[in-house]
Amino acid sequence: MDDEIAWLLTGYPWVQYHTRIDLLHEPPDDPQVDLARQEMVNHPQVQALVRGLQNWGSEPLKSHKSAGHPIHQLSFLADLGLKATDPGMAQVCNAIMAHRSEEGPFQTLLQTAVHFGGDGKNHWAWMLCDAPLLVYCLAKFGLAEEPQVQQAFHYLLGLAQDNGWRCTVSSEMGRFRGPGNKNDLCPYATLLILKALSAMPTSAENEAARRASAEALMQLWEQRTKRRPYLFAMGADFRKVKAPFIWYDLLHVLEVLSAFEWLHDDARMIEMADCLRSKADAQCLFTPESVWKAWGEWDFGQKKTPSQWLTLLAQRILYRLG
């Protein structure tokens, strides 16, 4: 572990920063932690993402797997640990919060093809495969207590059904529904709800929702050879380790589930963690097994050598689980 930590501390500022706070548990006011964070915020690759997000709403989201779309760049900045107080981020947060539906959820500029039940036009609207992610991002940016964020969050929680969160969209999306039985839960929507829950303050209502959504995902793993609601399977592609957190895969599910200590001893959680552990090489480093082409300039955007960011993400999960 010492050799691995030493290797991670030679990485990009975001790798150094999270190694210090997540693995070494150094305090935020430690000079080395503060330096790593400032270098992360000011790094050209991070600043390029922040600048691009100043035009929030200029690019419609046509597929939630569009890895280069601004919503996933936004989520990556939230995962890195940027705050609304960092340069350029207040404008981004204000732009997101300026588009809020009457019900409460924040909207994304969406375009759904006619053959998927849409009209092929751009609409400010929301789906359960994007709205919870915006709540997560705003909460991570330090805005969890803002009334608008709270209202959006609680509206989304209220959409829960007896088996989890189903495919749900705002009225602007017409008859759109994902490819599956309408009474099934949507695994990706449920994952994003749980992700938003992980970033919000704890309450009795939130704790009940955490347990319900976590159990729904655990059951999908337990029944993975029999169930694939809305075509979300947990097979070979699901098990491939990749970054950043964009879609429904092993690393993303474990990252969200491992945030809750009461799951750490669950046999299903241990089984998933063992699957992740098997991906490490002899030095306990992780090489991407699949990549998002839109992120090719990052160290996790290739499949030839171990990635420090991917290794940090994987080892952080295993570290949380003991």
Image: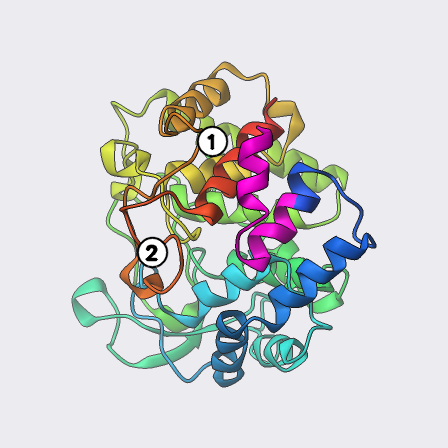
Quarter of the image with the N terminus is: top right
Q: Is residue 13 magenta?
A: yes
- Write down the quadrant of residue 202 in the picture: top right
Q: Is residue 28 above or below residue 236?
A: below
**Magenta span: chief secondary structure:** helix
How is the rendered protein coloured?
A: rainbow
Locate residue 150, reporting x and y percent.
Answer: 70, 60
Q: Is residue 228 left or right of residue 31?
A: left
Q: Contact (CB < 8 A) between labels 1 and 2?
A: no
Q: Residues within 10 Å of mark 1 (few under 14, many from 20)?
A: many
Residue behind mark 2? 301
The kind of residue on which mark 1 rests is Ala
Residue underneath mark 1: 216
Q: Nearer the viewer, residue 180 or 48?
A: 48
Apparent side of residue 72 relative to residue 96 in the rendered image (left or right): left
Name the image quarter holding the C terminus: top right
Q: Residue at x 45, y 32 (%)?
A: 217
Region rendered in magenta = 1-19
Q: Nearer the viewer, residue 276 or 162?
A: 276
Of tags 1 and 2, which is closer to the observer? 2
Q: Position of residue 50 (x, y in %)?
A: 54, 76
Q: Residue at x 39, y 41 (%)?
A: 187
**What kind of element bears circle 2?**
loop
